[in-house]
Amino acid sequence: MKKGSIVLGILMILVSSLFAQLTSDIPREETIIVDVLGGRVPSPSNFNVFRGTPGRGLDRGIQQLMLEPLWCVDFATGEIINALASEGPTYNEDFTKMTVKLRQGCYWSDGVPITADDVVFGVETVLRNSSMDYHNQFRLSIEKVYKTDDYTVVFELSKPNSRFHANFMDRWGAWRPLPKHIFEKVEDPVSFTFNPPISSGPYVVKDYDQAGYWTLWERREDWDRTPTGILYGMPKPKYVLYYFYGEDASKVIAQANHNLDMTSLTLEAFRAIQNRNPYTRGYRVEYPWVINVDPAMTGLTLNNEVYPYNIKDVRWALTLAIDIVDYIGIAFDGTAPMGVLHVPPLPVYQEWYYEPMEEWLKNFTLDIEVNGEPFKPYDPSATLRAAQYAKERGYKVPDNINELKEMFGPGWWKYAPDVAEQLLLRNGFKRDKNGKWLLPDGTAWKISIFGGSNQAHPSYRNAMAAAQQWRNFGIDVSVDSSEAWQTLTGLGQFEVTTTWPAVEPWGGHFDLYRVVEVFHSSYYKPIGEQAINVAGASSRWTSSEMDKIIEKMEKIDWNDSNNLNFGIEALKILIEEMPTIPTFGYPGVVAWDEYYWTNYPGAENPYCQPYHTWPNFKYMLPFLKSTER
């Protein structure tokens, strides 16, 4: 027997043995087992996520099962869910006062009603304690908070803020109400471990591993007194086990043994589990398998304060030197959806922005001529080229163009190295005798791409794909991977980095203020000072025209339809200037085992966001179906 097979066999025995010990007292057919994206929890006995310190293990079930927010975003349906709030926020005319109506009939897991007292007390506690989450946001915005009745909370703001409610909208992080009757008895709300935790969500903690590898949750008997139960009904699994298996090999073994129902994997590991477990499926049953409705837009960020990336022609030359189909083939075997805008090409954004901008994109020209005509860089045929790539790889894809756009994205920029060359030549660049690019001063043009060290992550895959494309174009490119890349990127210590080219949009709302706000010149930080947000702002790019659009957004309600127009105008400026280069939407690789549970929210029935790691996982659980095995 080969050594690798022996090691694999030992791993299978160990995983099965450990799991059997853990689950000996809970019925497997009533339990859904999911992995922990954030890894082992350093402080497993601490459930106080209201304090502003790391190591809390938010995604071991705390945000997905235990806590309900006021509002929650669902990026798959394009919906803003009213959770502990019964309706959306109400502002006065000048956005200096926000009123929140709470949902009646919701209770903490110890039987105490959830009321305005919890919200008011919680916010005031945060304002008094600088070490608690959202202290800075609340301190800068809140003049006064009070209740007018048991289910109505009023925030008086220190300055107009039409997006103040964003602090309470769960997307991956938000301020969530805490139980006043517990915290008012605590001397120090920061050091308090909140153990045992009191839940506003449909599950309570049953047990957890002192070493931080797993947390077991049990459905509340009064699940119908939570927003989840009121809105969607009873969550079907009685138990939810969050278990950190570690490396992908362990996850593959666990799911092959039906001891892991939902997990995130690399594409390579997903293929491995498909070969081992006939019950495994992805978000799509067939190629490209991956989740293409993730609200993150990945790509490349150029440091606009570092020569030569401060030149627009150079930024566009680098863009046109990319063959996006080959690029995504290198990164994710063609499975990721391409997008030219600074928002991901998920269905709602295709409807809100990609489709309305299609004609503008087709007619958009660069300040350069090809064959005597202004050059139009947009390539709507890139979708068909991506489909052809898949066919050549032996994958089956539909013929319908709308289905192809949904799968592969609605086009990208032309692969035009000849035009890229013209843009560089007119800025003094030249090639040496071997065809390698030289800077105008005659020195070799060398690009260092800075990215993360996780080889499965899009940041790493973008770096590798871009390096190959630009090497093909004649540039000397190196890739620098580091666990500190986010910190150093924020400080501007890079030339090109693979952090997101813009802040992720809401995913469930057309407002793009969240995407473009960080480009406002008031947020500018010089190199050496931490950017306000790594995504977008780390490019150090600003524009007076963008400032005007952002300031117009700030003066209107986020539901105002004029935000669509402002969003389009902002996206046009980002395209024209190309301070950062969007490439493809985040391709989420998940493996779902249908041995015990079915009716996951796959592409054929996307009734909910599809991740077990996101906070609205609790809204998926009422729709799962047991196979009763």
Image (cartoon, rainbow, N blue to C red):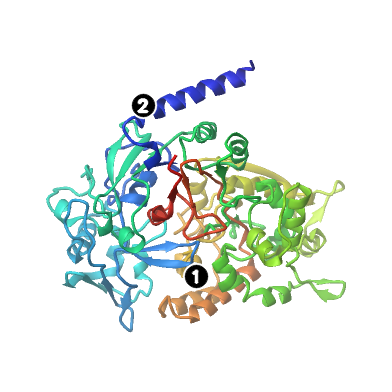
Label 1 environment density (alpha carbons within 10 Å; few <14, some 14–19, many ≥20): many
Up the image or down, 532 lies above or below 485; here it is below
Q: Are marks 2 and 1 in contact (CB under 8 Å)?
A: no
The nearer-to-camera label among 2 and 1 is 2
Give coordinates of residue 492: x percent, y percent: 53, 53
Q: CA distance from mark 2 to mark 1?
A: 49 Å
Give coordinates of residue 293: x percent, y percent: 55, 59
What's the residue type where badge 2 is placed?
Gln
Give coordinates of residue 102: x percent, y percent: 25, 68
Tell me the SS state at disc 2. helix
> Residue 123 vs residue 392: left or right?
left
| Quarter assignment of residue 205 | top left
| Quarter assignment of residue 33 | top left
Q: Look at mark 2 in the image and give the residue it sits on.
A: 21
Residue at coordinates 77% horizontally, 64% vertically from top-left? 423
Q: Look at mark 1 in the image and give the residue it sits on.
A: 512
Residue at coordinates 30% horizontally, 62% vertically from top-left? 230
Label 2 environment density (alpha carbons within 10 Å; few <14, some 14–19, many ≥20): few
How many marks can you see?
2
Up the image or down, 554 lies above or below 208; here it is below
Residue at coordinates 35% horizontally, 36% vertically from top-left? 27
